Image (spheres, coloured by chain):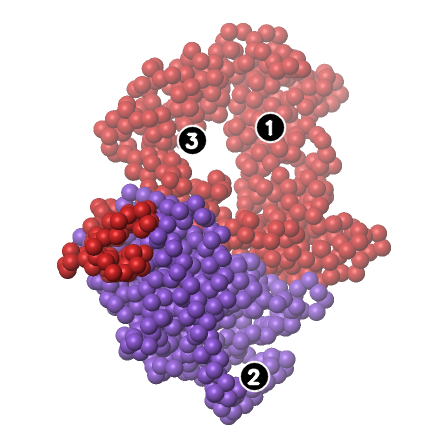
Chain colours: A red, B purple
């Protein structure tokens, strides 16, 4: 506050500054002032200072106001139901490091539920209580994976706050344009200006945002300055065409095939090969087709492969990388790239009108099978072809599905991602029923949340089997954690029976039964909590 | 003494937690999973069985509606009070998701409630007589008090001597002498049975290392300590009120023998400060009918949470009686007539200038005051360089926010609540700036605790 020395009335002693100086140096070193006459100097000084101190404190006046901050933009979304607001507070209060650490016990891991809560709240379009924003921003600061959902939920007032606190600058960075609205395709003047004058990050954000609304407009905007962009920037801009890719992009991408930069050429070729109707796709189909054929001369038909003998200039222009990585043969390297980029739809005609299943089932001569099938997998993922994905995945109960095969687990999970969520869940359920949980983690990660009924049951059954087999639950902690977050809360009732401490089988690890009961209790508690979270957000009235 | 069906909010429950660890542990237990046979009665009793690490579940029962504050019973071995099970159960109950249905209490819970009722009745019949009678004969007490006063007088005289020596040699030498000199003087004041003087002396020791401007602050505090010494030495000549203030500032215990004032008290703020030995809880209350602000203090020794807990935003009918002394806001909580319940009322607010003037007036009756509770109406939290201020929305005056608050999360909650719009803020206004404690949003909305 303004400590204004009171002007009314004469001071009893000297001025305040005079008193401070005298006190600092000591009364011994100063001649006694007139007002202290007849008294001991230090006591007279203390008397005068006490009067002045109170005068100064009592005379304090309000300060002049600084420029008020610009008010935050209004948030039109409705506020959370009270119960959901309280839930948010408890979820945010459970920051890592605040718990005792160590064993998790039966209590749910609240921080892990925050992403799900945010997704639910965002889907329903609620606004946060403003006083929760600092904790929300702190949580998003610590966990980058949380940022998109947290910032979407936090809304305009969080950006307003982030401008005032350097700790939360990330919120401005993570949002395109530093939180100011980007011009859309409906405002070509401003878009063009930002595109011409903006910083790189702003330009990428602009291009991405326009691409999401009007793919053609974004491509045309990029074309205006394409020739003058630096190679690294061209690569990033080209990459933003990946979303909303359509046949109309082909002429532009074809031109990019002649780019000076090899990385730009490769990306353009990859994008074109994802367009099965493109000229590049047709060229690749012709090249790949000439390498793969059905041999009918033997008793059972089989696939014969004749890998390309050279990588000519036209292949290179279409994005084929001529130099193989260390340890791989050149010819198989080239073959892989050709098959990967060829439209899958052309194989049926090429290989005797067979369906994808029949083609995958054909024997392949001379050990080319793994090379060929792996390339088809990459093609199925790139072209998002569920028919071929299904064929390449095979039956989940097949013995080779669980072990090392032509198709790795990572590729399987990518293939699964091209299928519909119900089919995906069913396949993974079948896989777990046959092969157990030890390989299932990656596959479970691509399944839609909450898990469909059959999948949830398969996971619970497999956990039950693992318990009866006598191992410790933390061997399955990854799957257990996923189950806590992904199992349908409606399953909680079925799990009740598992939360009791079972009699330990003879060969069980000591104490495992208790730990399993604890793990299942945590699972049930977490499911209950998730059910409560959802009903709170739906504003469900209690009984 | 009971009120039907007032469920608390989760915030109110969490405010009961004795420490941060229990708060976290309690929130984790606030889900249906580990609980069975949970239920609640119309009278505000909540019970449940919580599965823990042992084979037998813990029996937890809470009487939430007792007018003297909630009472807990849990069969777990925890010595925290309330334990995490009680907190978890209350959270579950507050969550209103149907996992704590209304119903008849099981025997074990009913027994406990029965016991409480009996004890309450006993207290009702025998109370008053045993509670207030002072032990020993009054003559001995008078002699004890006199001996203590003599000791304090000797201590105050010695302190005067030390202050004079300090000023004679100059404050600059105090910087070199360091903290040890002050510690020793403080110990002498403890021996003189003047804990108020001892605490002030100890604070003096910290000033020389408190950054730029320390000579001014040291002189101010030395002068006020001198004023307190002089007040004690001449207490017979002071008006009664001021003499009582001096006695309580020196550290003599007073008793809240002011007339009891009945009102519907709104809980404005509750916050704890802790040193190594003692946790002090301050609770500010506002009585709308009497337009009085009162301060309740509650202490917890050795890391235990203070016993009294009153969540912000609740109001209850009760009597409070003031401690003696001019400008004294401290009061003791007497009989409570209703359990705390959510209230919509807000205290009336002042402008920044009025609040500053109010502090000046308060200094008139107690010159040793550091701050005075005020409510500011329609102020906007405004950044001002590296600091913040609360600026009048409809004027051009502002109160700076105390620098001790700038690094705390409460300031950001206040800024977030405002979003550049006016808010109502209750806090302590003093010579070091304004310390916001609770804020209300513009329009309707519940109070947000900032501490």
Q: CA distance from mark 1 to mark 3?
A: 21 Å
Q: Chain of mark 3?
A: A
Q: Tell me the tag on residue A352.
A: none
- Residue at (57%, 62%) from the top-left corner? B29
Q: Nearer the viewer, residue B46 or A478?
A: B46
Where is residue B32? Give x, y as percent.
57, 64
Q: Chain of mark 2?
A: B
Where is residue A193? Give x, y as percent.
25, 26
Labels 1 and 3 within one chain? yes
Q: Tell me the tag on residue A243.
A: 3
Q: Nearer the viewer, residue B82 or A318?
A: B82
Is residue A55 positioned above or below A323 on the image?
A: below
Residue A337 falls left or right of residue A458: left
Is residue B39 positioned above or below B160 on the image?
A: below
Q: Mark 3 or mark 2: which is in front?
A: 2
Q: Chain of mark 1?
A: A
Where is residue B233? Give x, y as percent.
36, 71
Identity of the residue furthest to the bottom in this view: B125
Secondary element under disc 2, as helix, strand or loop, is helix
| Circle 3 Cα neighbour tier, 10 Å, few/some/many (<14 / 14–19 / ≥20) | few
Residue B237 falls left or right of residue A400: left
Q: Tell me the tag on residue A377.
A: 1
Identity of the residue furthest to the right in this view: A506
Q: CA distance from mark 3 to mark 2?
A: 69 Å
């Amino acid at each position: 506050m303004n400590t204004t020395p009171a002007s009314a009335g004469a001071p009893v002693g000297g001025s305040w500054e005079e008193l401070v100086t005298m006190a600092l140096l000591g009364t011994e070193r100063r001649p006694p002032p007139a007002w202290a006459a007849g008294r001991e100097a230090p006591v007279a000084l203390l008397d005068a200072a006490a009067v002045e101190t109170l005068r100064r404190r009592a005379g304090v006046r309000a300060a002049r106001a600084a420029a008020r901050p610009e008010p935050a933009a209004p948030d039109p979304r409705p506020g959370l139901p009270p119960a959901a607001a309280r839930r948010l507070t408890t979820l945010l209060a459970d920051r890592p490091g605040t718990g005792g650490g160590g064993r998790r016990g039966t209590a749910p891991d609240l921080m892990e539920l925050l992403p799900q809560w945010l997704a639910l709240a965002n889907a329903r379009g609620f606004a946060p209580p403003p006083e929760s924003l600092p904790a929300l921003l702190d949580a998003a600061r610590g966990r980058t994976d949380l940022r998109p959902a947290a910032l979407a939920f936090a809304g305009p007032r969080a950006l307003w706050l982030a401008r005032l606190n350097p700790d939360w600058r990330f919120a401005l960075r993570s949002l395109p344009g530093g939180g100011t609205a980007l011009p859309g395709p409906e405002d070509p003047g401003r878009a063009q200006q930002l595109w011409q004058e903006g910083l790189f990050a702003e330009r990428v954000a602009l291009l991405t945002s326009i691409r999401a609304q009007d793919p053609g407009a974004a491509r045309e905007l990029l074309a205006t300055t394409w020739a003058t962009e630096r190679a690294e920037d061209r690569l990033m801009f080209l990459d933003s065409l990946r979303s909303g890719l359509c046949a109309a992009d082909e002429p532009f991408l074809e031109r990019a095939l002649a780019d000076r930069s090899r990385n730009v050429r490769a990306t353009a070729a990859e994008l074109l090969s994802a367009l099965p109707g493109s000229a590049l796709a047709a060229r690749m189909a012709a090249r790949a087709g000439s390498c793969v054929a059905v041999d009918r001369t033997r008793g059972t038909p089989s696939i014969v492969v004749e890998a390309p003998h050279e990588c000519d200039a036209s292949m290179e222009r279409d994005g084929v990388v001529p130099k193989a990585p260390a340890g791989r043969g050149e010819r198989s390297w080239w073959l892989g790239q050709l098959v990967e980029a060829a439209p899958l739809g052309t194989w049926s005609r090429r290989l005797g009108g067979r369906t994808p299943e029949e083609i995958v089932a054909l024997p392949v001569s001379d050990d080319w099978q793994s090379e060929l099938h792996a390339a088809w997998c990459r093609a199925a993922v790139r072209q998002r072809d569920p028919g071929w994905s299904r064929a390449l995945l095979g039956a989940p109960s097949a013995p080779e599905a669980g072990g090392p095969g032509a198709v790795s687990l990572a590729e399987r999970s990518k293939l699964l991602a091209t299928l519909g969520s119900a089919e995906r869940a069913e396949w993974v359920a079948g896989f777990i029923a046959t092969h157990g949980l030890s390989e299932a983690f990656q596959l479970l990660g691509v399944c839609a949340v909450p898990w469909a009924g059959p999948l949830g049951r398969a996971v619970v059954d497999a956990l039950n089997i693992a318990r009866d087999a006598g191992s410790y639950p933390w061997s399955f902690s990854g799957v257990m954690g996923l189950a806590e977050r992904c199992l349908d809360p409606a399953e909680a009732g079925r799990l009740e029976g598992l939360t009791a401490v079972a009699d330990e089988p003879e060969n069980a690890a000591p104490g495992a039964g208790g730990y399993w009961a604890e793990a299942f209790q945590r699972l049930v508690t977490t499911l209950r909590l998730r059910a409560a979270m959802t009903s709170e957000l739906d504003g469900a009235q209690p009984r | 003494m009971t009120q039907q069906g007032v469920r608390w909010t989760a915030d109110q429950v969490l405010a009961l937690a004795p420490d941060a660890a229990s708060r976290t542990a309690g929130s984790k237990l606030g889900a249906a999973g580990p609980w069975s046979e949970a239920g609640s009665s119309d009278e505000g009793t909540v019970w449940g069985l919580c599965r823990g690490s042992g084979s037998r579940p813990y029996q937890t029962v809470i009487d939430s509606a007792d007018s003297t504050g909630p009472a807990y019973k849990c069969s777990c071995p925890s010595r925290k009070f309330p334990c995490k099970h009680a907190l978890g159960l209350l959270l579950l109950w507050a969550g209103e998701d149907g996992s704590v249905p209304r119903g008849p209490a099981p025997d074990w819970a009913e027994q406990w409630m029965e016991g409480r009722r009996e004890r309450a009745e006993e207290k009702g019949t025998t109370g008053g007589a045993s509670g207030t009678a002072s032990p020993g004969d009054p003559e001995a007490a008078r002699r004890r008090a006199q001996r203590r006063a003599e000791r304090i007088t000797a201590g105050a005289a010695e302190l005067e001597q030390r202050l004079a020596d300090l000023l004679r040699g100059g404050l600059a030498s105090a910087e070199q002498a360091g903290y040890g000199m002050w510690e020793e003087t403080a110990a002498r004041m403890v021996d003189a049975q003047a804990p108020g003087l001892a605490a002030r002396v100890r604070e003096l020791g910290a000033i020389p290392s408190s950054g730029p401007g320390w000579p001014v602050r040291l002189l101010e505090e030395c002068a006020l300590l001198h004023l307190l010494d002089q007040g004690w030495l001449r207490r017979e000549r002071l008006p009664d009120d001021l003499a009582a203030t001096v006695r309580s500032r020196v550290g003599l215990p007073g008793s809240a023998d002011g007339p009891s004032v009945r009102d519907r008290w709104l809980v404005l703020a509750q916050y704890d400060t802790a040193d190594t030995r003692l946790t002090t809880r301050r609770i500010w209350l506002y009585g709308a009918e009497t337009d009085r602000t009162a301060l309740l203090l509650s202490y917890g020794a050795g890391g235990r949470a203070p016993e009294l807990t009153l969540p912000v935003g609740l109001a209850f009918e009760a009597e409070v009686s003031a401690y003696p002394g001019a400008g004294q806001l401290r009061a003791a909580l007497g009989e409570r007539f209703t359990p705390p319940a959510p209230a919509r009322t807000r205290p009336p607010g002042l402008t920044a200038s009025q609040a500053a003037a109010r502090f000046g007036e308060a200094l008139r009756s107690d010159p040793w005051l550091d701050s005075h509770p005020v409510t500011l109406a329609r102020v906007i939290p405004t950044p001002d360089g590296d600091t913040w201020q609360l600026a009048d929305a409809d004027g051009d005056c502002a109160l700076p926010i105390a620098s001790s608050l700038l690094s705390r999360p409460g300031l950001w909650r206040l800024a977030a609540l405002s979003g550049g719009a006016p808010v109502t803020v209750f806090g302590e206004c003093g010579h070091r700036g304004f310390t916001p404690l609770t804020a209300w949003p513009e329009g309707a909305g519940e109070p947000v605790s900032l501490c």
